[in-house]
Every structure is written in structure tokens, then in C-alpha cells.
């Protein structure tokens, strides 16, 4: 079951790193002007929303140093919260394997967002 943090009204979906890496993330939208990409996946515990900003680099595109937004709370095998630093590291590893850079050429270059047929994303916390 998702946990709701009453102070922020954010829905946190709790899962371990292995389950996170097994999820099938789908590209939801990319905004070229804000350099923002959003993805989502369905888990047994709820919808996982994942977004990050990116920048152009000498090798193409790279994840920015800005925090990653995600409503997942990663836990160890005993169910203990891994904390924001370890969670952010695991999310960066996940994002690196998504092939998200391919979607940048499909996103509009004018203000606005490219919307897929996916349902809307949930509120999320910054990791």
C-alpha cells in the first residue's frame, strides 16, 4: 500500500531496489524548453512517477545535477528506508538505463509538453 505523508500530501510508493529495476518505465513527456523529462511505471504498490532535468553536453545529453523527483521510497531487504542519498544514486542508475536521450528528438522544441496517452502522474517528492 502507498504511504501518504500528511505534511506534504505526497504519496510514497515503497519498494526495494530490485523491484524498482524490474519495473517497465514509460516515457510520459519531455519539455525541451525546461529540459525536463518525465517517466512513469506501474508497480504492485502503486504508480511510480520519475522526472529529472537534463543538459546538453559535449557527448550529447546528460542528467543535470538537480534533484530527481520521484515518489518511490526505496527500502532494504528488511524494509528499512535507504534514505535520500542512496535512493538518488539508485534512481540515477535506473535513468541511465532507460535510453531517455532517444525521446529528446521526439519532443517539441517550442514551449509546451509532448504528452503521450499515459495517465497523469502523481504528486512526488524531490530526492
Image (spheres, rainbow, N blue to C red):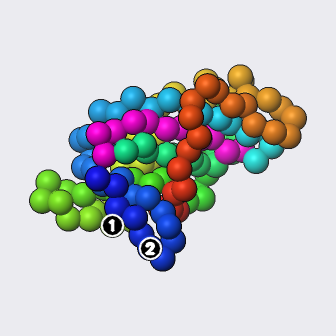
- What are the residue bounds of the magenta stretch? 35-45
- State how far apart marks 2 and 1 are (Cα): 19 Å
Question: Is residue 86 rendered magenta in the image?
Answer: no
Q: Is residue 87 visible?
A: no
Residue positioned most to the left: 78
Whether residues under marks 2 and 1 lie with C-beta atoms below 8 angstroms apart, the answer is: no
Q: SS at mark 1?
A: loop
Placement of 64 over or under 120, stated as above or below: below
Label 2: how many Cα within 10 Å (few below 14, some 14–19, many 20+): few
Few, some or many residues within 10 Å of mark 1 (<14, 14–19, 20+) = few
Q: Is residue 51 visible to us here? A: yes
User: From what the image shows, is residue 102 above or below residue 63?
Assistant: above
Q: Which residue is mark 2?
A: 6
Quarter of the image where one finds residue 12: bottom left
Q: Secondary structure at mark 2?
A: loop
User: Which residue is the site of mark 1?
Assistant: 83
Q: Nearer the viewer, residue 22 or 96?
A: 22
In depth, the one of 4 and 106 nearer the eye is: 4
Q: Give the residue displayed 34% in from the left and 39% down from the top.
A: 43
Q: Mostly what secondary structure, the magenta segment? A: strand
Q: Position of residue 14 (x, y in %)?
A: 30, 54
Q: Is residue 88 left or right of residue 14?
A: right
Q: Which residue is outermost to the right?
A: 110
Q: Nearer the viewer, residue 49 or 89?
A: 49
Q: Residue at x 83, y 32 (%)?
A: 109
Q: Nearer the viewer, residue 59 or 87?
A: 87
- Comparing marks 2 and 1, which lies closer to the viewer? 2
Amino acid at each position: 500500500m502507498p504511504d501518504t505523508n500528511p505534511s506534504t500530501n505526497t504519496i510514497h510508493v515503497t519498494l526495494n531496489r530490485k523491484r524498482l529495476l524490474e519495473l517497465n518505465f514509460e516515457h510520459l513527456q519531455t519539455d525541451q524548453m525546461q529540459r525536463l523529462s518525465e517517466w512513469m511505471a506501474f508497480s504492485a504498490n502503486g504508480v511510480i512517477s520519475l522526472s529529472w532535468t537534463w543538459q546538453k553536453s559535449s557527448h550529447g545529453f546528460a542528467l543535470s545535477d538537480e534533484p530527481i523527483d520521484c515518489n518511490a521510497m526505496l527500502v532494504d531487504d528488511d524494509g528499512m528506508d535507504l534514505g535520500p542519498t542512496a535512493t538518488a544514486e539508485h534512481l540515477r542508475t535506473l535513468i541511465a538505463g532507460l535510453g531517455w536521450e532517444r525521446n529528446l528528438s521526439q519532443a517539441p522544441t517550442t514551449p509546451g509538453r509532448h504528452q503521450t496517452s499515459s495517465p497523469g502522474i502523481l504528486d512526488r517528492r524531490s530526492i
